[in-house]
């Protein structure tokens, strides 16, 4: 019983991660269908420090398709985003929201959602494995119990397991029946 509960918890954690990753990936899909690739110049970099870890969130200036100067900040901050002010980068911007900018690379677009979904698969598999082991343990306990429980379980698994086959002729390998 305890194993099934632990397996259920792992499964729920996995489903939550897969769900969040799916939502992030869908959001990326929506962004990509409305985005335009351009070259942006780093205007500033916000430095975020938390628990001894430092991440950077750049703000870019760029020229949109209509020739207007725009600026936007990446939604993600990363330790890899330590860019120099004035540095030029390939970026994507959302035509519906010019302040929504992402780096034009795999991680900057798809990486976060895909990694979240992949991280959810691991607890899903662990939960399934634990639940299978728990079921196997409950079967062994059923056979170790009293005769009535064992017979009931055997008939529910294989209905013909209790049939009497003693009157059927025995067949030997390589010998044709008469």
Image (tube, rainbow, N blue to C red):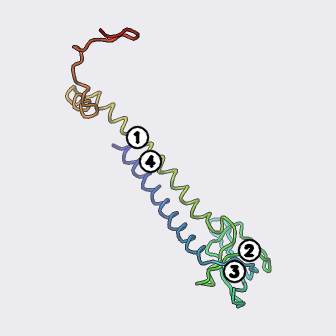
Secondary element at image label 3? strand
Question: Which residue shows up at 33% across the image and 43% down it?
Answer: 1
Locate residue 127 relative to residue 82 in the image: left or right. left
Tag in front: 2 or 1:
2
Q: Residue 97 in the image: x percent, y percent?
A: 59, 84
Residue designated by label 2: 90
Where's the C terminus, which quadrant? top left
- Residue 39: percent from left, percent from top: 75, 78
Q: Which quadrant holds residue 75?
A: bottom right
Q: Residue at x 41, y 38 (%)?
A: 133
**Percent position of residue 139, x then y:** 32, 33
What is the C-alpha distance between the residues marked 1 and 4?
9 Å
Q: CA distance from mark 1 to mark 3?
A: 50 Å
User: Which residue is at the far front?
Assistant: 178
Instruction: Give the structural element (helix, strand or loop) at label 1.
Output: helix
Looking at the image, how many numbered discs can be counted on the residues?
A: 4
Q: Nearer the viewer, mark 4 or mark 2?
A: 2
What residue is disc 4 on? 127
Residue 86 shown left or right of residue 114 in the figure: right
Q: CA distance from mark 2 to mark 1?
A: 48 Å
Q: Are marks 3 and 2 in contact (CB under 8 Å)?
A: no
Q: Which residue is mark 1?
A: 132
Badge 4 or badge 2: first in the primary sequence: 2
């Amino acid at each position: 019983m305890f194993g099934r509960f632990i397996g259920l918890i792992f499964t729920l954690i996995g489903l939550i991660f897969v769900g969040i990753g799916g939502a992030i990936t869908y959001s990326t899909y929506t962004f990509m269908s409305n985005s335009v690739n351009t070259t942006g110049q780093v205007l500033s970099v916000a430095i975020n420090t938390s628990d001894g870890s430092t991440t950077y969130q750049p703000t870019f200036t760029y020229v949109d398709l209509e020739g207007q100067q725009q600026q936007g900040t990446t939604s993600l901050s990363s330790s890899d985003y330590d860019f120099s002010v004035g540095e030029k980068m390939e970026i994507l911007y959302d035509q519906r929201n010019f302040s929504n900018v992402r780096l034009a690379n795999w991680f900057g677009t798809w990486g976060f959602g895909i990694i979240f979904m992949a991280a959810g698969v691991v607890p899903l598999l662990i939960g399934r494995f634990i639940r299978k082991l728990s079921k196997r343990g409950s079967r062994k306990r059923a056979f170790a119990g009293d005769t009535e429980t064992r017979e009931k379980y055997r008939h529910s698994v294989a209905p013909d397991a209790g049939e009497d086959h003693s009157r059927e002729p025995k067949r030997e390998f390589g010998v044709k029946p008469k």
